[in-house]
Structure formats: structure tokens, C-alpha cells
Image: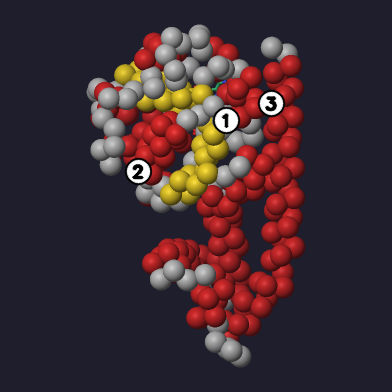
Amino acid sequence: METIGIIGYGSMADMMVQKWLEKRVLDARQFMIHTRSETERLHQLKEKHDDVNICSLDELSASCDVLFVCVPPLAVLDVLDQLHPAKKAIHIVSVAAAVTLDKLTQHTNQLVSRYIPTLTSAVGTGVSLVAHGVTVGDEEKKRLNRLLSAFSIVREVEEDRFDAASNLTSSSPGFIAAIFEEMAKAAVRNSELSLEEAYEFLTYALLGTGQVLVEHGLTFAETVNRVATKGGITGEGAAVIQKQAPQMFDDLFTQTMKKYDQLKSQIDEANKHH
Ligand SMILES: NC(=O)c1ccc[n+]([C@@H]2O[C@H](COP(=O)([O-])OP(=O)(O)OC[C@H]3O[C@@H](n4cnc5c(N)ncnc54)[C@H](OP(=O)(O)O)[C@@H]3O)[C@@H](O)[C@H]2O)c1
């Protein structure tokens, strides 16, 4: 029975552990969790699943097979530095944005992979992005794939495309929410609808659109065409989006990519001082 180590127990770690327990992919006894402070979230997990092991970094690195590092980007390399060389082989999986495989391998001799989670895995869907260090073998890849498949679709993407892909898998629920917030506000400005009504109407439209896309295998363009009949009202609205959205989304990519670069520089900077 494999042992799963977790360092840091924030929203992402909690999402993963809860899903694995809920889907019975892993048993509570298989978890070894280390956090720098005692948090309410971890306390609640322990209350519900007493068999979860809360332990020191040393205990964790002595026993686990796969180790998920779930701390903020600027803390990841620091955490790796604190791990004493383990006697056994561990597959370290970092969930942090902007911490490259190259950086990770400079701070550990173990096998390393990256995994970018998505909030939507909390409801058992979404794409988990993975990238593996060159030394990671098929066995380890398969094991990680099996774990993440419990709550997502797993896609391997080369690291040079990782940030752009993360925009579409991990950040996109936030972007989609921001877009629909604006649409709801526009409805209120331009009609007698209340904000509550707008939220409800759009939320179910969003849920249903996703389901139609997946279950009927439609493309976005096909979905637009289904709703927007020639010369109709929806077509008028879609044309406004088609005209104005490209610039907005180009800006979104420019700004987010800039932010990734900044974060990478900050990580470099922080590690110079160590
Ligand atoms: N949220 C998302 O949708 C999302 C998506 C993709 C990737 N990620 C990545 O997932 C990682 C965790 O995100 P999250 O949303 O789960 O964050 P979070 O809820 O803020 O949790 C962060 C965890 O890291 C711990 N931590 C913070 N600073 C630390 C340090 N210097 N040393 C050791 N532990 C430290 C925190 O412990 P304390 O409670 O003691 O502060 C907490 O347990 C990040 O690297 C992020 O890039 C997040």
C-alpha cells in the first residue's frame, strides 16, 4: 500500500485529500501530512478521519512514496531544502505555479513532477496538468495519473506551454466567473432584472453549456451556431463578443504571462540569498 505525503494543507491539498477519501482511491491511513502550523482545516480532516497521520518532515520523507508539495510558489524550494536525503526513492510532485522542473531538480535528488490542480476537481472534473522530470519513469507516471484521474482528466503538457495551459485549466474558473459577473452587472444596468436573478440564470446557463459541450461533443463554434440562427438576436450579441473579446483576451494573456515571469524572477531572487 503506497503512502502519500502532503506538505502544506491549504485549499488545494484539502481538495485532493477529500476527493481521494471520498472516492475511496486511498485510505486515511495512507496519508502523512506535514504543515508548519496547526490549522483549522487540518484539524477538521483529523476529526473526520482519525487515521490520517500528521507528522514531521523527517517522518514523512522516511516513509512516503509520493510527496505532494502544496505550499505557495515562493516556499517550495525552501521546503525541498529542508527535506533530508531519504533512504528510499520518493516521487515529489509540486503543485506550485512558476516553479520549474529545472529549479526543483536543483533542490532535490528525488524524482520530480509538476501538477497544476484546478478548483473544479472539487466537483470531480477539470483538467489536471502534469509535466515530468526526465528521470521519472513509466511506473511513477502511471501512479500519478491514476491518483489524479480520481477527480480530473490528466493531460501532460511540455513545460514551455505550462503557463498558457494553466490559464485555461487552473485560472479559467476565475476568468469565467469574472466574465459572468460583468454580464450579470450589464443585465442589471440594461434591464429590470435583479442581480440575484442574473446570477441564477447565468449560473445554470454556464453549467448547462458545459454539459452540452461535453455530452454532445459540440465545439464552441457549433454551440454558437446552434443558438445564433442567421439574422437572429443571439447572432447580434455574439458578433459584439467576436469583435471586442480578442483584444481583451490578448491583454489577459499578456498580463498573466508577465506575472508568471515576475514570479519566476522572485523565486530566483529568493534562492540567491540561501
Ligand atoms: N488555488 C488554486 O486554484 C491553485 C491552482 C493551481 C495551483 N495552485 C498552487 O497550489 C499551491 C497551494 O495553493 P493553495 O490555494 O492550496 O494555497 P493556500 O490555501 O494558501 O495553502 C497554502 C499552504 O501552504 C502553507 N505555507 C504557506 N507558506 C509556507 C511556507 N513558507 N512554508 C511552509 N508552508 C507554507 C500554508 O500553511 P499555513 O496555514 O501555516 O500558512 C498552507 O498550508 C500554490 O503553490 C499555488 O501556486 C493553486
Examine the rendered structure and indicate whether residue 158 appears above or below residue 80.
below
Residue 39 percent location from the top left of the image:
42, 23
Label 1 SS: loop
Q: Nearer the viewer, mark 2 or mark 1?
A: 1
Q: Is residue 259 visible?
A: yes
Examine the rendered structure and indicate whether residue 163 appears above or below residue 29.
below
Residue 127 percent location from the top left of the image:
48, 49
Residue that badge 1 annotates: 134
Residue 120 percent location from the top left of the image:
44, 49
Residue at the image point whose x is 62% and y is 76% from the top: 238
Residue that badge 3 annotates: 267
Residue at the image point whose x is 70% and y is 52% from the top: 253
Q: Nearer the viewer, mark 2 or mark 3?
A: 2
Q: Label 1 is placed on what type of residue?
A: Val
Residue that badge 2 annotates: 150
Q: Is residue 205 visible?
A: no
Q: Residues within 10 Å of mark 3 (few under 14, many from 20)?
A: many
Q: Could you tell me which quadrant the C terminus lies in? A: top right
**CB-based contact (under 8 Å), mark 2 and mark 3:** no
